[in-house]
Image: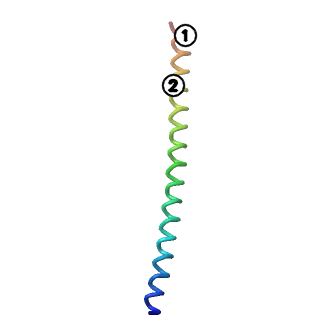
Amino acid sequence: MSEKRKCNKYNYFDIFLLKVEILYLNFINIFFQNFLFRRIIKIVTLSLICRNILSKTYF
């Protein structure tokens, strides 16, 4: 009986750790997606601005 309780206790703790780990990984994933998305938007807008300036200058 006591071994079964130990097993249950550790199982619950493992499940808890697994949930925490999944939440943590989701947070990191969302953060990096936002970071990369903002960076891509910056690059695209800068390239469009540069193209606009170059087209006005040379043509």
Residue displayed at 46% across by 82% down: 8
Above/below status of 37 relative to 27:
above
Amino acid, disc 2: Ser
| Numbered badge on residue 47 | 2
Q: Residue farthest to the top?
A: 59
Nearer-the-camera pick, 41 or 26: 26
Q: What element carries label 1?
A: helix
Amino acid, disc 1: Lys
- Asked if marks 2 and 1 touch (Cβ < 8 Å), the reply is no
**Residue 56, percent from left and from top:** 55, 10
Residue displayed at 53% across by 16% down: 52
Residue at the disc numbered 1: 56
**Residue 12, percent from left and from top:** 49, 76
Above/below status of 57 relative to 21:
above
Quadrant the N terminus occupies: bottom left
Nearer-the-camera pick, 51 or 28: 28
Other residues around mark 2 within 10 Å, as few (<14) / some (14–19) / many (≥20): few
Above/below status of 29 relative to 39:
below
Residue displayed at 51% across by 18% down: 51
